[in-house]
Amino acid sequence: MYQIDAVAALRRTAHTLRSRRLWPHVSRNVVALGFTSLLTDVSSEMVATVLPIYLVLYLGLTPLQFGLVDGLYHGMTALLRLAGGFASDRTQREKEVAAVGYGTSALCRIGLLGAGGAWPLIAAIVAVDRAAKGLRAAPRDALISLSSGRAGLATSFGVHRALDSAGAMLGPLVALAILSAAPDAYDLVFVASFAVAIVGLGVLWLFVRGVRGLALDRERPLGPGQAIRSLLATRGFAGLTLAGTLLGLATVSDGFLYLVLQQRSGLNPGLFPLLYVGTASGFLLLALPAGMLADRFGRRTTFLAGHGLLLLAYLTAASGEVSLSDLAVCILLLGGYYALTEGVLMALASAMLPAEVRGTGLAMLTTMTSLGRLAASLAFGATWAAYGPTQALAWFTIALGCAAVLAAAALRGYAGDGGRSAT
């Protein structure tokens, strides 16, 4: 009898845990897209994490030249984001549009094999790769958004970003393992990167369902003029776009920040990829909790708090000589910044955008933030070349503080903020 009572108690406990949803419920599409991004990020980060040290220390690029390449890395996505967003809304084939972007990025890995040490050619390939990322980003995020309920948007993006950051963590480790076994064998890195990218493309094609097969209230596709008018009429979207752009203009790229930290800490250049691993690890651990926190207590507050962590990271890096503990704190702050902002920004926009212009709206928002980061990379590189890294980082720290205040004002009164009101 006592055994029967114990089994019944266990069943009641399990039912209680399920009802409380201690583990968030997200659609299969979100999980499949997460694994697609995981594999794609393994591929892309294998290349991205060796580029700064390869270009600056191996090929001898100046900070301004590296700023151009890094600016292309962040800014070229802007060229095709709007095209990808509009194409996905117009055709209602988000999966197929995203697949074109993922496939093009995979081909760019092979292109790097023939580039050798010609940095202008490397820059051109990076530009195509980032343009392809822009093409796929909006359809992918639209798929996540359209496959999720409004109240759990930030959680769904948090799950996706957690898997995405797992790939960003594994990619540098794979590159480091290859280069440790075969120093300067960058061609092996590029070949392995291509193979992983193809597997990621296969996951997208085989396991992600197009949202046309889901029960969604999608309306007739809009033309370009109608889509723009719909976006302009969407309450709060202009303020959100302004906030994202201002913050992008004051954001130092990870590559530059890592170079500053490497110089000030005396870190062995061979361990440079571990800085990316540390940031991705923090992102991985915090992305899902940050998404759940944003859905529960407010996406606007969470988003602004993330930029507060970024400001602390800049202050840590700017404080003279950087110890190993300072380095670890800075990397953890950077990972926290991404966890509190990346998916939360998309959730903020998704909550206000109508389904028929979801892809176009997300693309417009990320295009403006990418253009801001492109300008920031060029400005930081030029300032470093003219005045040194200390002065450049100090100016950008002040700029980020001012941008955060202006962004808070632009987002004041935002209504679709998640939390209790959205449930």
Image (cartoon, rainbow, N blue to C red):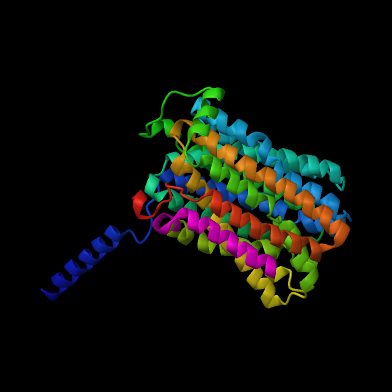
* As drawn, 180 above or below 325: above
Residue 187, can we see it?
no
Residue at 56% across, 48% down: 37
Q: Nearer the viewer, residue 191 or 143?
A: 143
Give the residues in magenta: 294-315
Question: Is residue 300 shown in magenta?
Answer: yes
* As drawn, 91 above or below 188: above
Whole-percent x and y of residue 123?
A: 80, 43
Whole-percent x and y of residue 48?
A: 72, 52
Q: Nearer the viewer, residue 313 or 412?
A: 412
Q: In the rendered view, does 334 fall on the left or right side of 112?
A: left
Q: Nearer the viewer, residue 185 or 101?
A: 101
Quarter of the image containing the N terminus?
bottom left
* As drawn, 211 above or below 419: above
Residue 292, can we see it?
yes
Residue at 46% across, 49% down: 413
Whole-percent x and y of residue 13?
A: 24, 66
Q: In the rendered view, does 341 fall on the left or right side of 1?
A: right
Q: In the rendered view, does 376 fall on the left or right side of 337?
A: right
The number of numbered discs placed on residues in the rendered structure image is 0
Residue at 35% across, 51% down: 421
Secondary structure predominantly adopted by residues drawn in magenta: helix
Whole-percent x and y of residue 338?
A: 58, 57
Q: Nearer the viewer, residue 389 or 334?
A: 389
Question: Is residue 343 shown in magenta?
Answer: no
